[in-house]
Amino acid sequence: MRKYLALALASIAALSALPPAAVAVTVPPGVKLAKEQVLHRGNGSEPGSLDPHRSEGVPAAHILRDLYEGLTTEEVDATIVPGAAERWEISADGTVYTFHLRADAKWSNGDPVTAADFVAGLRRSVDPATGSAYSQILAPIRNADDVIAGRKPPEGLGVEAVDDHTLVIRLIGPTPYLLGLLNHSAAYPIHRPSIAEHGEHFSRPGKLVGNGAFKLTEWVVNGHLTVERNEHYWDNENVVLDKVVYYPIEDQSTDLKRYRAGEIDWTYEIPNSQYRWLKENLADELHVSPQLSTYYYTFNVTRPPFKDNPGLRRALSMAVDREILATKVAGVGEVPAYSFVPPGVGDYSPSHLDYESMPVAERVAEAKRLYREAGYSDDKPLEVELRYNTSENHKKIAIAVAAMWKQALGVKTRLLNEEWKVFLENRKTRAVTEVVRDGWAGDYNDAYTFIELMHCDHGLNYSGYCNPEYDKLAEAAAVEKDRATRRAIMEKAEAVMLADHPVFPIYYYVVKRLVKPYVGNYQNNIMDHPYSRHHYILAH
């Protein structure tokens, strides 16, 4: 363990010793740029909020990466590099991080970014009054769990502003993935005067003050959202784009049409049904790559018919042919999923559903037995509602799953699609949901970003799953210092959860989008964290 910890801290220390460097883009010599540096990005659903500590979903996260910057940030290939902090030191035992902020870091109104701003942001994230769905992500910080649970005030969180440019974070144990975690929106700083003046409305255009490469200038709900270059950003001289316009386009076919019409330069996704045509006709603009993300369905285990009924949940999961869903219905390189944690996570071997290798016929036969055991039959079929957010791709998966349930078990499924904000709220409250579409993209490259999600108290545990054994394992993994022991604990936790079937994985995501050839420096990365500051528009 000591050898591993020493090696891990040595590699992190090497990163912290890097000299201050640009994090925006370096345009290669001889490259001719377009006169108008404006990027038009398809962005899926309308973001529910741009409050960094209350927002949810990938569309909001893409925008927030432009508007804010954490202590750390990422290169175009998702490598973690210094962000608002130019360097840091780590204690010998790996539990105390001292960050030194850039002297030239400023908010978009010109105010200096201080360590107290990060303290305020971190405290706000864990404050129960904020209602952050991501508060649990900060659990490695000392006293975070007690603050989240209301046992201690936010001021008890293990963070301290030593002076304007020095921030100390104290942890409950070594956390090798901390630097990756600190570029999440939950760890963003907050401009305190803005909240004091505008209250809950501080995240609107004309009021939002961020410390990222861009600033919010316009937000037409269900139309577009515009960010423009933040002239006060510390690395502004290396930012090339002057403006980025985000379009909330939920329908992938519409996204494609607008792309082909030249209205957008970058799609959020592509319609799966058009993949072959796109591969044949727009191969140079089509980008498909692995992503650290799992697509799954969640059972609401807090109310009938799935409360206290793991056998029924297992039956519905077993009746689904993941191979057909991944290769035929999705069909853009997705891989059938039998684990919650996707492959590719460092130093981890995912636990798998025990029927992964079972022939389909045997699997369906067992599903039928469990279905009957749960009290259902052809004469008394299960009637269930499957809810998903508006999307052509989600709809096709839902239709296929409903058909599989019908054919194998006789289940009557009501499909219900909802606008993103409504869907998020219903999924969160669990008041009306039965089965809901779900998915998780890792916030950092460590299995714990998936394991912590199913803890009873996690704000994004939409199933309502609460298993004391699982929670104990997840909590133990959070503080375990030995690498091998920590890995074994997480693998056991995943196996316990999969056996309970609060969710059932369907496939592992891939990033799939179209990008115009004149968008410079576009690169695939496993995190799918594209920052606009990394790109530019070529003359065309």
Image: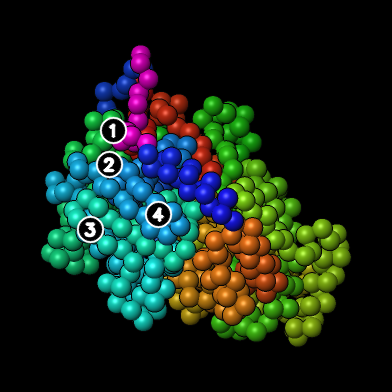
Residue that label 1 marks: 239
Can residue 270 be seen here? no
Q: Horizontal and vertical percent for residue 38?
A: 30, 33
**Disc 3 designates what residue?**
162
| Kind of element beneath mark 1 | loop
Q: Residues within 10 Å of mark 4 (few under 14, many from 20)?
A: few
Name above or below for residue 372 compared with residue 101.
below
Q: Main secondary structure of the magenta part?
A: loop
Residue at image position (68%, 49%) is 335
Q: Position of residue 349 (x, y in %)?
A: 68, 54
Q: Which numbered disc, 1 or 4, marks the residue that appears first in the sequence? A: 4
Q: Which residue is depicted at the point 61% across and 32% down?
A: 279
Nearer the observer, disc 4 or disc 3? 4
Q: Residue 146's quadrant in the figure? A: bottom left
Nearer the camera: disc 2 or disc 4: 4
Q: Amino acid at mark 1?
A: Val
**Tag 3's secondary structure?**
strand
N-terminal of the pair, mark 3 or mark 1, is 3
Between marks 3 and 1 in the image, the one whose residue lies nearer the viewer: 3
Residue under numbered circle 2: 213
Query: Which residues, given as a range, are shown in magenta?
Result: 18-30
